[in-house]
Amino acid sequence: MTGRIGCCVPFCRRTRGPRKGDRVPISSIREWICAEHYRATPASLRRRRSRILRMIDRASGVRLFRLYDIDRRIWDRLKAAAIERAAGITS
């Protein structure tokens, strides 16, 4: 095993390996969207997720768990948007 994960968009052949400065080791990352498909997602969702990730860096306690839940929901929407855009469902 090379320790690489593939893009979560079906039939995308792009992969990534571990990178210096990653917050989480590559082995625990389950999903990833390549740059080409990530750019195809709505900018508003990308900005919202970026803001939530910055808030996660500063949060603690119960608020941290709420922010993780929000981040997960935004990620699911980003992933769905990337897959739909790649399949040609939305423009």
Image: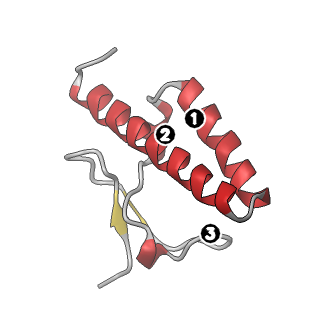
Would you identify the image quadrant in which residue 73 lies? top left
Q: Position of residue 33 (x, y in %)?
A: 41, 48
Q: Nearer the viewer, residue 51 or 83?
A: 51
Q: Residue at x 44, y 74 (%)?
A: 28
**CB under 8 Å between callouts 3 and 1?**
no
Say which label, 2 or 1, has the lower sequence index: 1
Name the mark on residue 90.
Answer: none
Residue of label 2: 74
Say which label, 3 or 2, has the lower sequence index: 3
Residue of label 3: 22
Q: Nearer the viewer, residue 17 or 26?
A: 26
Q: Secondary structure at mark 2?
A: helix
Q: Is residue 37 above or below residue 42?
A: below
Q: Which mark's residue is nearer the viewer, 2 or 1?
A: 2
Would you identify the image quadrant in which residue 65 lies? bottom right
Q: Residue at x 74, y 50 (%)?
A: 54
Q: Nearer the viewer, residue 61 or 87?
A: 61
- Residue count near mark 1 (Cα–Cα under 10 Å), binned few <14, some 14–19, many ≥20: some
